[in-house]
Amino acid sequence: MSNDILFLAEFSGGSPARSGLELATGAAELASQSGGSAVALAYGAGAASGAAALGAHGATRAIVLGDEDRPPITYAPAAVAAARDAGLALLAPATPNGRDLAAALVGLLDLPAFGPVRAVRVVDGLVETEQATLQGSVITTARPADGAPTPAVVLVLANTFTPAEGGSGTAEVTEASAADESALTRATVAESHEAEAKVVNLEEATIIVAGGRGVGGEEGFGPLRELASALGGAVGASRAAADAGWIPYQLQIGQTGKVVKPALYIGAGISGAIQHRVGMQTAEHVIAINKDPDAPIGEFADLFVVGDLFQIIPALTEEIRRRKGA
Amino acid sequence: MKIVVCIKQVPATGADKRYTDDLRLDRAAAEAIINPLDEYAIEQALRLADAGAAESVTYLSMGPDQAAEALRRALAMGGDDAVLVSDPALAGADEWGTAKVLAAALDKLAPDVALMGMASDDARGSLVPGAVAAMRDVPLLSYGAELAVSDGEARVRRLSATGYDWVGAPMPVVASVTDQVGEPRYASLKGIMAAKRKPMETWSLEDLGLSADDLRGAALTQVTDARAPEAKAPTERLENLPAAEAAAKIADWLAARKLI
Amino acid sequence: MTYLPTADHDELRAVVRELADERIAPRAAEIDSSGEFPWDLKELLAKQDLLGTCFAEKHGGTALDTIAQSILVEEIARADATTSLIPIVQKLGALPILLAGSEEQQDRYLPRLASGEWLAAFALTEAAAGSDVASNRMRATRDGDDYVLNGSKRFITHGSVAQLLTVFALTDPEQGGRKGMSAFIVETDTPGFAAPRVEHKMGIRGSPTAELTFDDVRVPSANRLGEEGEGFKIAMATLDRSRLGIAAQAVGIAQGALDASVAYAADRQQFGQRVSDFQGIQWMLADMASQTEAARQLTYAAAARVDANASDLPYWTSSAKLVAGDTAMRVTTDAVQVLGGYGYITEYPVERMMRDAKITQLYEGTQQIQRLIVARQLLQRAGVAARG
């Protein structure tokens, strides 16, 4: 049984997703605990040429599953061929694409699956994970059952690992071996619609300013954008704002939207219902601004500012710009 | 076109939830409901049935006997019949175990679309749809804001990084849908009364052709510890300050934490 | 006779409570402050088949037992008393047809009531004839194959929004109300009918309480219920059953006030502890809870008797309405007390619940009338004819 730590590295438009860099770092950390190597399973447009650079973030080897722009789930059979008995753990990003690929591996290889985890380590030659369950009310520690096949699939949220900077290695790149036939490859994109405005990937943002029902309308997001810009962060929203059409659904944070783990989350005009909370509760620092002193978000925020967001946010933006300018 | 909607009975949101001494989710302790995200799958299936695109809607659930309540509630919203897979060997099943059982049951029911919600309230991996598709060797169409069928093909409208795509595959498929499907209907009183007369079967592992050995204890993972999260520092509150003063204090707070 | 709620009853309660919590409770404050009839909630209730529970399946209803009907009203009233009047008055307006209508009349009208397409109302009370029903003055004069109705009614719940009224008028004024009154089905789009004004009220403000005028309103004799002169009897038989709906409403209002009080007391801190930690408050909450439960159980006992067609049915329904109405007033008043200053302001629901509760001591027979009915039955059992 191999002590290697595998990880999924998704590429699109020629570049690696930030999750690939984060998981490379994480895999390298675990590999040092297990005595093996960090091995990337790279897929998507640009994987063939970009896989070697994963070495700079800790990958020793990279297996290229394919270089085409197609639904990630269709890479599952190739991933299976590369992953079977090939390591102790396989780290997958806890994004829709990552979860689908992870799920396919679980189903095709009967693998134990964990996560999304808040910590993962190798203990006594086995993977051990920590995850928050029951909407954050219980922290469980888990490991594979005795005799379970390997690798163990571990879902990892964005910003759990910080990509190592300044590394210089290159990963040794190989092609994936031939994959078995699978119906999973039959999903195809029939139509593709691009939105007019470019939308930031919230999962990669380290600072997020999010707006909810209290923002009142599309124009209400203007001050939030200014604040996000002053902080160097991104704008997000609750489901209420997305349903109302004030911002695109790609910016919705929550159980059915993006799950984010920024260093700073500022929620304005957001009440903090559980469906939103599970999307951001692992943020390192949470500030809430709401005119309702009893809003549930006040119970789990680190700093709760009761007041009018339309007064406070512009004032805060000005204050931050002033301090940064000085 | 036949749809099977997989649903799960979960503890009610906000109910007192906890783990038992042997580190399993204590399902008896809390009031039980249909997993809220599964209601969107039910709603999507019923819309297709209302439009005449689906001839039958069957509900499938794996759980203890009590899970039959969730199936009755689903039948009260609409649909034709239900199957409960219940077996003592399945207590403590993890996502893999659940997928294995559902996959076997779905193979037996042979729907054109096996439809699921995108995640469950208690487990959070969202792995069951993909694992089931892989085990059954059928295409997966996941995270659909909408599901459509025509000419032997199923399609989902799926958010992409910059907009949305329609992703399709020839049926049979496994599909999962999000809450963007639209508000699930309430069960009407006539629906509730009709539900009592709709057929519901209970299957054991044997009925699926599975043995307890096949299921390896229904879980490939084991929980070794369950504890309360670290106590969070109490929330600092700023109330009714003039905007400029609030802004200064927030900026100080951010600076102290090196966020600006 | 046993009347424990069944699993079906529990399921019905859970379903209606979910609907009430999600869709009705959030509208309650606005309905009260605007005084507007909640047409959206009427549509919702109709769509969920909740307006047809007292009608037979052949008419499109769901024929629930009376305990189930009470549970339905209770759970809606817990969220909003005004909205709970929609199923209550639908039954009240339909009862004369259910009790005294011919099969033809029932087939003609009940389906539209069961589906909620039409609303019904019960038009008995007049400006000078409230408790004293027999001194009604409205007339129904025979003219060929029709009756011509002239007069006015007052305090008619939903009279201005209903499509169908069951109206009581004197066909034989010489005989007076007890023997000379008849009952009619009147469609409100009949020429000569008008609902010129609605009252401004202390509570149930979203429920229109209307004055109705009948100016040569022509009604076919096929719309008369029962025989001429049976009106009083039909009215009393109706009220003997419909007042149970008010009992259920009162229980629901009390429960809503109790739930709000418990939640507040458990959350609010004064003098370094939760308000609910004070014995004095615990005693108040305990009294509120046990009295609400007693009213509830008496209502179910009465409901079981209605279904069993007990001969002393009025004793039971009047007792239930009497106890429940007084309980609702007491519990809601105590709820305002538990919430203190916050109980007096409109940001919290209990002041509205207290204003809403008062009507349960007044309509469908004042508490004083209920006491007369109960006393009469008591004394009858003891072999003494009651005077008065």
Image: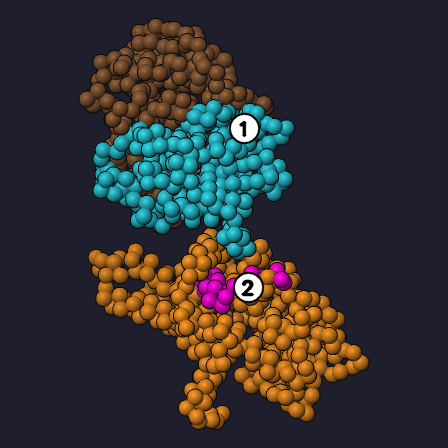
Chain colours: A brown, B cyan, C orange
Is B113 placed left or right of C21 in the picture? right
Residue C351 visible somewhere in the drawing: no
Depth order, front residue of B121/C5: C5
Residue for point 25% across, 26% down: A146
Residue for point 30% across, 56% down: C267
Residue for point 55% across, 22% down: A189
C71 in magenta: yes
Depth order, front residue of C40/A67: A67
Question: Is B183 located above or below residue B101 in the figure?
Answer: below
Where residue C63 is drawn, which disc sits there? Answer: 2
Indicate the amino acid at tag 1: Pro
A304 in magenta: no
Indicate the amino acid at tag 2: Ala
Q: Main secondary structure of the magenta part?
A: helix
Q: Chain of mark 1?
A: B
Query: Percent position (x, y) of residue B20?
Result: 25, 43
Depth order, front residue of B128/C47: B128
Q: Secondary structure at mark 2?
A: loop
Label 2 crowd bin: few (<14), some (14–19), many (20+), radius 10 Å: some
Residue for point 67% across, 77% down: C225
Distance from the alpha carbon under mark 1 to that under mark 2: 42 Å
Question: Is B38 located above or below residue C27 in the figure?
Answer: above
Q: Chain of mark 2?
A: C
Q: Over which residues does the magenta segment extend?
A: C58-79
Where residue B172 is drawn, which disc sits there? Answer: 1
Question: Is A181 located above or below residue B215 in the figure?
Answer: above
Assign the N terminus of chain C to one quadrant of the image: bottom left
Residue C46 visible somewhere in the drawing: yes
Query: Percent position (x, y) of residue A70?
Result: 51, 18
Question: Is A78 located above or below residue B204 in the figure?
Answer: above
Where residue C172 is drawn, which disc sits there? Answer: none
Is B19 placed left or right of B124 in the picture? left
